[in-house]
Image: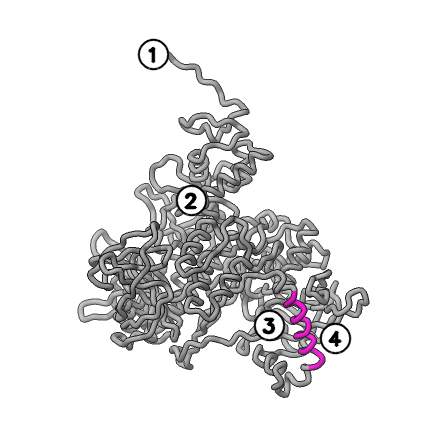
Amino acid sequence: MTRERREKPSRKTSAAATAGDKPAIIHGAVPPRDVLLEFIADNPDRASKREIAKAFGLKGETRVELKDVLRALEDEGLLKKSRKSLARPGALPPVTVLDITTRDKDGELIGRPAEWPEDMGTAPAVLIRQSSDGRGKGKSPAAGLNDRVLAKIFANKDRTGPAYTARVIKIIDRRKGASLGVVRMSEQEIRLMPIERRGEEMVIETEGLGEAKDGDLVEVEVARTGRFGLPRARVLSVVGSVASEKAISMIAIYAHGIPHIFPQAVLDAAEAARPAPMTKREDWRDVPLLTIDPADAKDHDDAVYAELDPNPDNPGGVIVTVAIADVSWYVRTGSPLDREALKRGNSVYFPDRVVPMLPERISNDLCSLREGEDRPAIAVRMVFSHEGRKASHTFHRIMMKSAAKLSYQQAQSAIDGKPDDKSGPLLEPILKPLWHAYAIMKRGRERRQPLELDMPERKLILKPDGTVDRVHIPERLDAHKLIEEMMIQANVSAAETLEKKRQPLVYRIHDAPALSKQETLREFLATIGFSMAKGGQLRANSFNGILARAVDTPHQTMVNEMVLRSQSQAIYSPENIGHFGLNLMKYAHFTSPIRRYADLIVHRALVGSLGLGEGGITPEEEAGLDDIAAEISTFERRAMAAERDTVNRLIAHHLSERVGEEFEGRISGVTKAGLFVALPTYGADGFVPISTLGNDYFIYDEAHQALTGEKTGLGYQLGDSVQVKLAEAIPLAGALRFEMLSEGRKMPTPTRSFHKSGRRDGGQRRPMAGTRPRRGR
């Protein structure tokens, strides 16, 4: 047997491509598709287009060729975009929040992603590395069971054990092994019934019950486990009775791991804070800035003012001033307040409570732009031409005094000719100039043509005892639109200023819809006689034409929902790709630093780059923007999921005594497993399993968004009005199950892209009820 001579890889050969027994890939040439896919799967931390090009030595035109190949793989569904990186569908992003849930047989810690879509099956297991990662970054923080961590993800190239390994970047929350459940008492024993689907029942011994009673929602810790029988638990605290809906939001807070109790060091730091001085601040206390907020708002972090531009070179122009609470003065990088704010990422809003990002001493007092009180702020003065084009802007660190606090309804009523005692004196000097400026800014917005979805938001109105009174759809007023447009322009100005200063920041980015999603939407629109242009360069206004055509037709709601589903999710990133939905090239969140950590970073960046005094961004914070952006994007999704789950549970609790009643509904979702039916009156979805639709075999037609009986040709389509009966309501799971009462109607012949779903006999997973999450701008 002869030994073949093996040469060392030359510098013209990619080391990444020659790993293992793979054939050598010519350095500088775009590798084959299968090699690209394997590289991305094996190197999730190096899966950005830039890193891929670097790994294979691609420059110039070959980089353009690489982008075309990667885009084609995206369109075919073989890759998906995750932040600035690419990943195989179902793969974890390079930075992920993990819950450490167990140990393997060797005692190694195993984690799973904190957020994982239900329709993707079981979340993948991740082996936690506890030693140095070999890249000079030292040891990872020591994590333990039940901790929630932010981790760097690596593919397990050994192909044994879990599919991924991870290096812990930071520990977000130490969960201390606590669980949440409901006490159920019987003559034989006391049990804890879990509220999480993957939870397990436990036995609570009498001496470990404390003051808990049957039906109480409690937090427990495991007292002991054995080889046989259920674990034994001890009650740590009583959250409340599940019969009271005030406990419902606590379930979501716990289930999603949302920090809701401020450590004493954070509260002490907040109490020790003192009003900001005038040092390096401009005195704007005579400028009649006012706040316009919801009537029940407890904090006010933005104020506005507008006036005609006296500059003769800008005839008919206006100057719009937006002042935002100067949170960066009080919350300094690395302080206890800062660490806790980053741990939370954003405030979370439930129907019955708010979990704030910052303690009330900061958010509701020192940083709330209260009427008639001196408050520090960062203001931007924006000059607009008569045509609504922004000509210039400047940022200022100021001391202000709000001239008035108005609700949206108050301000709108005054403009509509019905001022009250408070808004009346403000009408001519402040409110009318604001509305005049908004009319000018609208010209710019109409020229820009952002995506204009018509998706009314529903708000749960609770009774004093915490039970649901009704579902309310707030009227969309010009006052809302005015504040929104002024905030958008302030956000644009912040991004533009920081870019000009070459200052690292966190952008709010929104990618264009993937071509595969565009094609799904195009096929659906064709079934109702609508057309959509082909090509990868669609703009937001391309969708607006479709939405406008659907107005006042039976398809209006359905078209809005399908356009929404085609959109990407907005996230935070230090790399800018623009904001597709708003049709803006530069956009960063600046206007809500009380509620969002991203805005606080932008404030610090402005303070530092413009030399506005203390509280600027630090070099260490700049170096960590990638991880911070990934973390706060995850926390935003966590907050949305928790808010949605709470609404689901509240509605399920509200309807639990109406099982057997009939309701008018509308089909809001079609899947291979069945139909989602929305109850417009309640703002909730329930599920109709396909097994209950009849004896026919049903074909899932993705293009038509329909289920069609194979024999009869009768079926149901997205948007259909139907009559359903409530068969089951499970408050703790937030689930509603319906039985279909309406007969199916004659369906179009299914297109070539369909799935035969058939009848299912038992074992169906019951999807959660509730509306889909609202995408944040």
Looking at the image, tell me whether mark 4 or mark 2 is earlier in sequence order: 2
Q: Which residue is mark 1?
A: 1
Task: Give the residues drawn in magenta, as a range.
Answer: 428-443
Q: What separation in Å lies between label 1 and label 4 (alpha carbons)?
A: 93 Å
Residue bearing mark 3: 300
Q: Which residue is mark 4?
A: 286
User: Considering depth in this image, is 492 or 531 the residue closer to the camera?
Assistant: 531
Looking at the rendered structure, the secondary structure element under dot 4 is loop
Which amino acid lies under the numbered mark 1 shown in the image of this protein? Met
Q: Residue furthest right?
A: 312
Residue at screen point 29% across, 58% down: 673
- Marks 3 and 4 close (CB-CB < 8 Å): no
Q: Is residue 570 above or below residue 241?
A: above
Q: Earlier in the sequence, mark 1 or mark 4?
A: 1
- In terms of secondary structure, where does tag 1 sit? loop
Q: Secondary structure at mark 3?
A: loop
Res. 344 visible in picture? yes
Residue beneath label 2, please?
76
Residue 294 located within the stretch drawn in magenta: no
> Please, what is the three-letter code of the amino acid marked with disc 3?
His
